[in-house]
Structure formats: C-alpha cells, structure tokens
C-alpha cells in the first residue's frame, strides 16, 4: 500500500502533509468548535495542535491534507496498517466547520476506503466515546460497532471489504 500516493475524486484531493503545511492547517484547526467533541478539546491552541500535527507527520502511514475545490479544509489519516491481518485504521479526521453536515466526509471516506480496499480486508475507526458526530458519521458509512475500549475511552467500529462492496465504496 503506497501511503505517499495522491488520492483524488471529483472536487476532492488528498495529499500527503509536509512540515511546511503547519501554518495553513492550523488556520483551519484554530476554531475551538471543531474540537468540542474530541478527546483533546484544546487542539485549537497552537502548541496543542503542534503535537497533533507532529504525530501526523511521524505516522508511518502519513497524514493527508484534505482539499475541496482547491481549498484546504482539514486533514485525515490512515494508521496502524497490519499486513498480517490485512487491516488498517482511518481517523484523526477534522474539517472546517462550514463543511459539517455536507457530503464531504462521506466522499473523503469513500475515496480512502476505495483505495484501502485494494490492499486490506478490514478498516477500523476508533472514535472517542463522547464524539457523537463521528460515531454517526462512521455508521453512515456502513461501519458497525465492533468493540468498546474502556481503557482508552474509544468505540471501535469495523467495516469489511465485503460490506463496503455492497454499499457505496466503489468509485466509478
């Protein structure tokens, strides 16, 4: 699985994040409302967001900037790729508030799932127990609750290649 690949579909482009993207992405991330249902509600602060950004830069599966109609609107990641179980996680996604409630998240995930399912059989989504917006979003993708991780306060949702093929994950 090539994690350096540019992914695009219609008006959406996902490109690998670079160190010099910090200021541009922080401009999007500096709205406190974005982080209200996240486990770290202070990510709108520069020094806190820097840790989040650096973890994306250091992620072996990269972190992607999300562009919609050539505007930077957020970021997302693949992470914890497992070549033995043929699984991967998608998450750490956020969008500028003006894109909440639109089809953007669904289409970004469709793009990511379509690419991932060329290489894996299962995609997992770890969602903080109080992030109700994200829980609903992954359920709309067809993912189902797989297990609860009480220690990390996460709900783990699962979507298999077979389930995804039956739904909307094929980009035509």
Image (cartoon, helix red, strand yellow):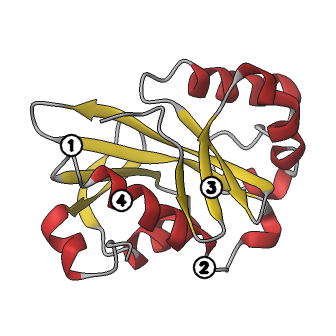
Residues at marks 4 and 1, CA–CA distance in whole angstroms: 11 Å
In terms of secondary structure, where does tag 3 sit?
Answer: strand
Residue 55 lies left or right of residue 123; in this view the side is right
Q: Secondary structure at mark 1?
A: strand
Q: Is residue 4 visible?
A: yes
Camera-side mark, 4 or 3:
3
4 left or right of 68 in image: left
Which residue is labeled 4 in the image?
A: 113
Which callout, 4 or 3, points at the residue further toward the start of the chain? 3
Q: Residues within 10 Å of mark 4 (few under 14, many from 20)?
A: many
171 or 56, which is in the foreground? 171
Picture coordinates of residue 143 (x, y %)?
A: 30, 68
- The residue depicted at 61 percent of the width and 42 percent of the height is 15
Image quadrant where residue 161 sits: bottom left
Q: What is the spatial separation of the Cα atoms under label 2 and label 1, in whole angstroms?
A: 25 Å
Label 2: which residue?
A: 103
x 28%, y 33%: residue: 81
Q: Are marks 3 and 1 in contact (CB under 8 Å)?
A: no
The residues tagged by marks 3 and 1 sit, at their Cα atoms, a distance apart of 23 Å
Comparing marks 2 and 3, which lies closer to the viewer? 3
The quadrant in which the C terminus is found is bottom left
Q: Mark 3 = which residue?
A: 13
Question: SS class of the residue under badge 2?
Answer: loop
- Residue bearing the label numbered 1: 87
Question: Few, some or many C-alpha atoms within 10 Å of disc 2 (few <14, some 14-19, many ≥20)?
Answer: few
Looking at marks 2 and 3 on the same chain, the residue that comes earlier in the sequence is marked by 3
Q: Are marks 2 and 1 in contact (CB under 8 Å)?
A: no
Helix, strand or loop at mark 4? helix
Residue 78 lies, in percent from the top left, at 43, 40
Q: Residue furthest left?
A: 84
Compared to residue 75, the image places residue 108 above or below, namely below
Q: Earlier in the sequence, mark 4 or mark 1?
A: 1
């Amino acid at each position: 699985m090539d994690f350096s690949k540019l992914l695009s579909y219609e008006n959406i482009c996902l490109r690998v994040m670079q160190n010099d993207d910090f200021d541009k992405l922080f401009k999007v991330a500096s709205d406190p409302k974005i982080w209200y249902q996240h486990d770290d509600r202070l990510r709108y602060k520069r020094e806190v967001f820097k840790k989040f950004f650096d973890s994306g830069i250091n992620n072996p599966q990269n972190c992607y900037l999300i562009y919609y109609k050539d505007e930077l609107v957020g970021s997302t990641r693949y992470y914890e790729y497992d070549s033995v179980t043929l699984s991967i996680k998608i998450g750490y996604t956020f969008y500028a508030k003006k894109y909440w409630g639109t089809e953007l998240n669904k289409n970004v995930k469709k793009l990511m799932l379509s690419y991932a399912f060329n290489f894996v059989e299962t995609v997992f989504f770890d969602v903080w127990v109080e992030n109700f917006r994200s829980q609903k979003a992954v359920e709309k993708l067809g993912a189902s609750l797989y297990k609860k991780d009480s220690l990390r306060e996460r709900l783990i949702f699962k979507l298999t290649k077979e389930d995804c093929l039956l739904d909307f994950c094929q980009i035509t």
